[in-house]
Image (spheres, coloured by chain):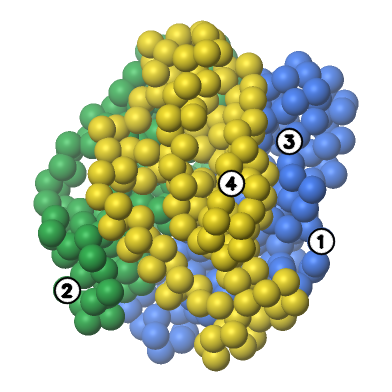
Chain colours: A green, B blue, C yellow
């Protein structure tokens, strides 16, 4: 069973879509045991399992990666060549290499085995708004 | 077929559990070909496939990530806000974003296709002892 | 259905093998819907989904990770102990921890759901030539 989630982003940051996935799992009525595969069809954003309790975790995550991979206008990044799509473009590709493009989550009794504090996020690395597509397979 | 591995950690570092997985695969007697999915149910530790020959690889890995993401008491990390769970907590979430939460390993003739030097590790990012749960699915 | 791709590398960098995978999918004539699992059987190179349009993206990716994790001969890396396999060896293990060892890509109508600009790469982290093996499972 497969579907595609469409997520609208409005700037860099984490966008939770755990409940979208849960709703699809309920409606899909697939096998009660299996594996959910998520795959993001872009190279400038990531998928992430992260804490969904304190929103400051998300702010801090973004702040860390922004410092680790600053915009290409930053003097420390002057060696970058792929800059014509904007100062946030190549850093977005770098972040996309460091964080998951695909996630696999076991399903037990029809539910994802997420831990108590785990949520599923799209991590948008671009500053402009984007429409992001996440392919899902349940098998 | 699914199960859950429970691992006790006692401080930051790598904990190998390759043999636990191999034992389960032998006992589960699943299909001789398929895929093993591992998923760690926490946001402050990671799963890792790494070299199991020289223990210094594990020490060096930990040393690198400790420098890349120092405790929140380090002056360079003063921008972090999620600090009330301890100076190692937010760095643990950051490391958990940079390393796998899920792994998928093909099974051929009943065996994982691990390379000669590959072992399966839980990478604990917290300094206190923790009980960690890793969900496994064989299909 | 499973197979193993063998890739020859000649120095650090990204090696695309999207077309090898597509050819196998066509010849394997597996189920039209499912999941492709790729797993690299080494601890000093990675798998990566990245942009396949502008080759400078690949050059920049390599340049970034080379700066983030310089050779062990670099003064900033003097704390590394696992150095006897060469100055590029331990940095290769570190990079292999930061980027995927396994990828899962949904298959719809017999095709991978790759986005328009997504290609599948082996990211070689060692400077010497290597023969790299990537296990694949289609199910």
Which residue in the structure is indicated by mark 1? Answer: B53
Return the mark for residue A73. Answer: 2
Instruction: Give the number of the mark in front: 1 or 4.
Output: 4
Task: For the residues labelled 3 and 2, say whether their Cβ atoms are less than 8 Å apart.
Answer: no
* Residue A56: x %, y % from top left: 33, 63
The residue identified by callout 3 is B113
Q: Of marks 1 and 3, which one's residue comes earlier in the chain? A: 1
Q: Which of marks 2 and 4 is in front?
A: 4
**Can you see residue C139?**
yes
- Secondary structure, mark 2, is loop
Q: Which mark is residue A71?
A: none
Where residue A21 appears, as percent x and y from the top left, is 37, 28
Categorize mark 4 by other alpha carbons within 10 Å: few (<14), some (14-19), many (20+): few
- Secondary structure at badge 4 equals strand
| Disc 1 with disc 4 on a shared chain | no
Chain of the residue under the numbered disc 3 shown in the image? B
Residue A47 in the image: state x and y as whole percent. 38, 44
Q: Can residue A50 be seen in this view?
A: no
Q: Say above or below: C88 vs A110.
A: below
Badge 4 is on which residue? C8
**At x 43% / y 30%, what residue is drawn?**
C19
Q: Spatial distance from mark 3 to mark 2, Cα to Cα?
A: 44 Å
Check if mark 1's residue and mark 2's residue have beta carbons within 8 Å: no
Spatial CA distance of label 1 from label 2 is: 42 Å
């Amino acid at each position: 069973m497969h579907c595609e989630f469409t997520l609208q982003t409005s700037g860099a940051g984490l966008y939770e879509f755990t409940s979208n996935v849960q709703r699809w799992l309920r409606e899909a009525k697939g096998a009660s045991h299996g594996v959910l595969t998520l795959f993001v069809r872009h190279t400038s954003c990531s998928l992430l399992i992260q804490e969904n309790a304190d929103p400051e975790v998300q702010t801090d995550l973004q702040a860390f990666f922004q410092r680790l991979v600053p915009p290409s206008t930053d003097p420390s990044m002057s060696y970058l060549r792929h800059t014509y799509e904007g100062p946030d473009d190549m850093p977005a590709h770098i972040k996309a290499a460091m964080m998951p493009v695909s996630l696999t989550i076991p399903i037990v009794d029809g539910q994802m085995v997420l831990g108590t504090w785990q949520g599923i996020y799209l991590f948008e690395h671009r500053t402009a708004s984007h429409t992001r597509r996440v392919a899902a397979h349940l098998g």
